[in-house]
Structure formats: structure tokens, C-alpha cells
Image: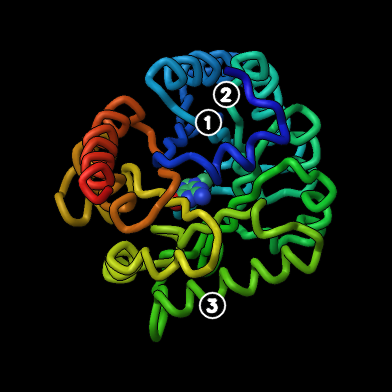
Amino acid sequence: MPLFPHDFIDFIASSNQPLIMGIINVTPDSFSDGGLFLSTRKAIAHAKNLIDEGADILDIGGESTRPGSQYVNTDEELMRVIPVLEALADTGIPISIDTSKPEVMKHAIEAGAFMINDVNALCNPGALEAIAPHRHVQVCLMHMQGTPQRMQTNPQYKDVVSEVKYFLQQRIQAANAAGIALNRLVVDPGFGFGKTLQHNLSLLNQLNEFTTLGTPILAGLSRKSMLGAITGNNIDQRLHESVAAALLAVIKGAKIVRVHDVKASKAALAIYNALRDCDSQFDQ
Ligand code: 9MG
């Protein structure tokens, strides 16, 4: 059933099941064989496929944030994401836009985005102000050390869990001070964003530490190099480890998992849901 804008915050808060966010990249990285028109059509077709597979939310991104990726200017990013967002508006599925640029945030919200997924945690000048007036819009504040271009060059922490948590706490406070209420926020420790394998594992293992921040937790582990570092599999062969990681993130407290492989993740989480429901019946 289509959601009305003001229902989205309730939808996230009240869902007693983990939610699956399907990833849609509208970037030349993923569409190396054609121009923007072809990329747009492929992205829309891919999005419809993920909806059929059971995605609860779609996250559309026009600028790659992979380690070493290059900056995309505002006009180019808008040309990539807005047509895809508009084409999906009548599907009723809540759309998140993965961007750190205030101008893209504003246009995306006007075009019907329910959520902004900012890997820069609204740190860019003007980002807090772009979001604050739109009271139906949810925001994901993600932690990153450094920038995508250089973040994997020797990341350092004394205590990764406390430092990431402290950063997210500060960003929650900044958002609240700008008029963005706590119920509009989601936090994400940013797996792979300026972190070694050991840092990522500590964050996953202690993900439930982040529940005390008072917001839902989003986790994105799908196909990431930390998984390949453990199994030795290439990026296009990381289905099994991605599903395992999504399931573990949920067990450790994630409410939303950001994934490429919706169908497989959905099946794994169905087992989790069945077990959790059986326990709650048992408890009564
Ligand atoms: C855009 N993007 C890539 N990886 C991500 C992750 O782990 N979390 C969030 N929120 N966004 C991500």
C-alpha cells in the first residue's frame, strides 16, 4: 500500500520486523556500457525488480562512495538520480536518496524522497538547513573517517566503537539543534568507511552499543571488501557472506539493512523473524 509522507517515520519506528533497503546505483561504475539514458532505464528496471523481490525501501545513489571514487558535481548527480526517483514515485515504495549535497537533498525531497542517506552525516555546509523544514523526511547519519578518496589509507582509532558512537551522538545533537527531531534520525556506523577489517569486526560485534543513541540503526555490509578479506571472494561472489553479515547485523540490533541481494536477504531474515516470533509466543 502506498505510504503518505507523514507515515514514513511511523513506518520505520513501528515496524517490528527488520527492514530491507535495496541499493540502486546510478553511476557509470555500475553502468559502464552506455550513456545516462541507458543508466536511467537500467536503474528503474533494477529498482522494480528489487521491489518485486520484497525491498521495503530503495536507496538511490548518483555518486559512488566506494574507496577511491571520484567526486560528481551537483548537476550531474541530479541528472542521475531525479529521473529514477520520479519514475518510481507511483510504485508507493519509500525512496531514500544517497547524497551529501544540500542541493540534491532539496530537489530529491521535492521530487518525493522520504529519506536522505548521508554518508557525511549532514556535515556539509547547508545540509542541516536543507533537511530541517521537511518534517516528514527521515535522515540516516553515517560515520566516515576521512573522505571516500583517501579513507582507507591507514585509518586509526584508539577505541573504534566509542569514537564512532561519540561522533554519531554529536551529529544527533547538531541535528536536534537545527530542528530535526530524534524520531527523524537513523544512525549507521559506516562499515568500510575509513576502517580496517578489525575496526569493522569490532563495530559489528558491538553494534548493539549503538541502540542507546535512541534511533534505529542502519547497517550496510553488502558485498564490502571486509567480507572479501575474510572469505577471499571477489565482489561479484560475495552473496553468501553478505547475507550472513546482514543477518548478524540484525541479530546485533540493526533495524534496516542496506543490501544488493534483496531476495536472499529477505529469505534469511524470514528465518530470523520466525524464530523471534516463536520466542515471543513462548515468553507469554
Ligand atoms: C551509500 N552507502 C554505501 N555504503 C553505505 C553504508 O554502509 N551505509 C549507508 N548508510 N550508506 C552507504
- Dot 1 or dot 2: first in sequence order is 1
Query: Which of the labelled discs sits on residue 166, or is there none?
Result: 3
Q: Secondary structure at mark 1?
A: strand
Task: Say whether residue 79 is left or right of residue 250.
Answer: right
Element at label 2: loop
Residue 157 in sight in this render: yes
Q: Earlier in the sequence, mark 3 or mark 2?
A: 2
Which residue appears at 21% of the width and 56% of the height?
Answer: 229
Marks 1/3 in contact by CB < 8 Å: the verdict is no
Question: What amino acid type should be assigned to the residue bearing mark 3?
Answer: Tyr
236 sits left or right of 89 in the view: left
Percent coordinates x, y for residue 78 in the rendering: 73, 33
The colour scheme of the drawn protein is: rainbow
At 48% from the left edge and 69% from the top edge, which residue is drawn?
212
Q: Badge 1: few (under 14), some or many (20 or more) residues near its Cα, within 10 Å?
A: many
Choose between 6 and 193: the one closer to the eye.
6
Type of the residue with mark 1: Leu
Q: Gap in Å between the C-alphas at discs 1 and 2?
A: 7 Å
Residue 160: x percent and y percent? 40, 76
> What residue did someone put label 2 on?
93
The reply to whether callout 1 and callout 2 are in contact (CB within 8 Å) is yes
Looking at the rendered structure, the kind of residue marked 2 is Ile
Label 3: how many Cα within 10 Å (few below 14, some 14–19, many 20+):
some
Q: Which mark is residue 58?
A: 1
Image spot of residue 68 (x, y percent): 47, 54
In the rendered view of the protein, which quadrant contains the N terminus? top right
269 or 107: nearer the eye? 269
In percent of width and height, residue 138 lies at: 66, 46
Instruction: Return the disc, 1 or 3, that comes first in the chain's sequence.
Output: 1
Q: CA distance from mark 3 to mark 2?
A: 33 Å
**Residue 197 vertical position relative to residue 103 in the rendered view, above or below:** below
The secondary structure type at the circle numbered 3 is helix
